[in-house]
Amino acid sequence: MSETTMQADGGYYTAENHGPFERHGLGALELEEGGVIPDCQLAYTTFGELSPAKDNAILMLTWYSGTHGILAQTYIGEGHALDPSRYFIVVVDQIGSGLSTSPHHGAGPAFPRVRIGDDVRAQQRFLRERFGIEELQLVLGGSMGGQQTYEWAVRFPDQVRRAAPLAATARVPDMNAIYVDALCDALTADPAFAGGDYGSSEAMAAGLARHARLIAILGYSTEFWAQECWRALEFESAGAFLEGFVIPYFAPMDPNDLLCQAWKWQHADVGRSAGGDLAAALGRIRAKTFVMPIDEDLFFPLEDCRREQAMVPGSELRVLNSISGHLALFGLEPEFVAQIDRNLGELLAS
Amino acid sequence: MSETTMQADGGYYTAENHGPFERHGLGALELEEGGVIPDCQLAYTTFGELSPAKDNAILMLTWYSGTHGILAQTYIGEGHALDPSRYFIVVVDQIGSGLSTSPHHGAGPAFPRVRIGDDVRAQQRFLRERFGIEELQLVLGGSMGGQQTYEWAVRFPDQVRRAAPLAATARVPDMNAIYVDALCDALTADPAFAGGDYGSSEAMAAGLARHARLIAILGYSTEFWAQECWRALEFESAGAFLEGFVIPYFAPMDPNDLLCQAWKWQHADVGRSAGGDLAAALGRIRAKTFVMPIDEDLFFPLEDCRREQAMVPGSELRVLNSISGHLALFGLEPEFVAQIDRNLGELLAS
């Protein structure tokens, strides 16, 4: 079922924009919300070689609007903890990312509702079918990638030796869920949205820009703005940074794809595996877990992360310091990435 | 020119909703942005008696969407530092508040742009004309009331003996200005807005609700949501709190009035009095100033307040602790109001 072709989509969701990738067809994926994806394709890319004993695999998962490209560029390579000379690193793009099966591939607004748990089950099947991987040395990811990391550690405790949820919680905080409502509303309230039949991202420019501005407001910390950290990107004003960087970043994306991801983000809750009991679900984790919040994060605040970390047996809280807030994950600050590398290095050595 | 009649507006902007008030007509008010308000009326209310020497006057100023009613209820009275048995306390509703001259009184979207400095100049004339007050023992206010407080202390350094800007900065932080853009956009992007000729607040229900949700997201702190502080108001969920409290609070307000206030908020900058030099402007202050930020405030963050405080000669930083964030100003936590009373008591005794 594996394919090694590039994605055929024109426009934004291409290997040219996101780096080379392959796709693996899983056939039908039954979804927790009751729908089905008839021919579910996961986009992925790998770094390094799988050992004959298949005991050096790491899985990294993507965040909202992000793909394997930014992760590879920022976190993977010689000199990083995620070193392809030692590990076989698999990055899987989430369903709805635009690279794995997504609304814009055809179903549009009729695309079924997908949960983090659907992604994780699909990823587990993929790793087994494609590579015969039954155990992961490390599962990690930032933001929605961290939500998927928690879901992996709770659902498959015997297959995850180590876990590193970065800038994420296992259950979405209320404030964050309300905020995601506003993000979705920015898209769906655009008169051009037309119930999801908007035709093109260009037609949705106003809604996508509104959505981008909201991402910027909470995505960065209060001090990012106060200290004008956007000057590092050579902008002259906060407004120019929004118009020249944040808005263009989202402009080519497909709104239905974003909405698919946003719904997953907003409904993330590993407690669903334990009848709604978050502590019971987190108590199942057997992975050595470093919970790694960002100190100034307004999406997944430090205190929320700290409370969950206390429920994960044997886990450690490793606070990442960054003036940027949540979007520090993009790696503009070398020292931020170095903190992650130091923590991951220690975790992988344990 | 003084009137003692109640406002004639039906609906929301009445003494029944906001507590009794009077109005004072200033005649024409020339505006800094070049327009004019032909018959500018300031709504106000007073507590206590002005001493024969006119040396016991305190001026308190209103925040975005708020009026004298919430201030009187929360901060003024026996047992508070703002004690009418000792002080003559004047609360002036800002231009655009719906009680003082505002877009909904007739001009609608043609209402001219008003700056914080216009309010402050109008207030100074009013105090002189109506009461013969030339010196204020204390000027204070929270949020936009704090912006006005800074403007008073910079423009009229000889008339302000003490100043207490609460949860406010003298120059609007970039992040906050971008956020206010989103608030305004929530109103103006509503298809019912029709360039400001929407007819009624009811017609603008969707935009007003969108605006209210955005206020809630940053108005409260991350821990307010995490600790479910809305339970103190007897709601069952964060969503019920939004639908039953935050959205209904804004629903009857006039969008053009809110937009008038929002523009002032967004463009607040005392540095304009000194050719754009914030430090030079703040250096003019002669009032004994207690800068009082709220530790978890996401509108006017602590660090922004701290940097400005360092520019105000002889000032002190008095940090207010509240889990609620910016909207702690509404006074739901008695201990928060007690902190303000202790600081104001000390300031007034100095």
Image (tube, coloured by chain):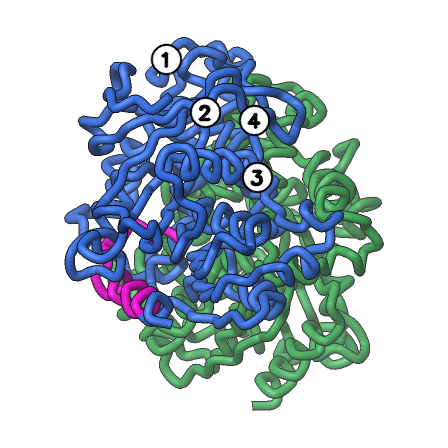
Chain colours: A blue, B green
Q: Secondary structure at mark 2?
A: loop
3D distance between C-alphas at marks 4 and 1:
36 Å
| Spot occupied by residue B231 in the image (x, y as percentages of width and height) | 79, 57
Camera-near label (1 vs 2) is: 2
* For the residues bearing labels 1 and 2, Cβ distance under 8 angstroms: no
| Spot occupied by residue B62 in the image (x, y as percentages of width and height) | 61, 56
Q: Quadrant of the N terminus of chain A?
A: top left
Which residue is identified by label 2? A26
Which residue is identified by label 3? A117
Q: Magenta stretch?
A: A326-345
| Spot occupied by residue A178 in the image (x, y as percentages of width and height) | 60, 43
Camera-near label (3 vs 4) is: 3
Q: Are marks 3 and 4 on the same chain?
A: no
Which residue is identified by label 1? A200
Tell me the subunit letter for badge 1.
A
- Mark nearer the N terminus (2 vs 3): 2
- Asked if the stretch drawn in magenta spans residue A197, the answer is no
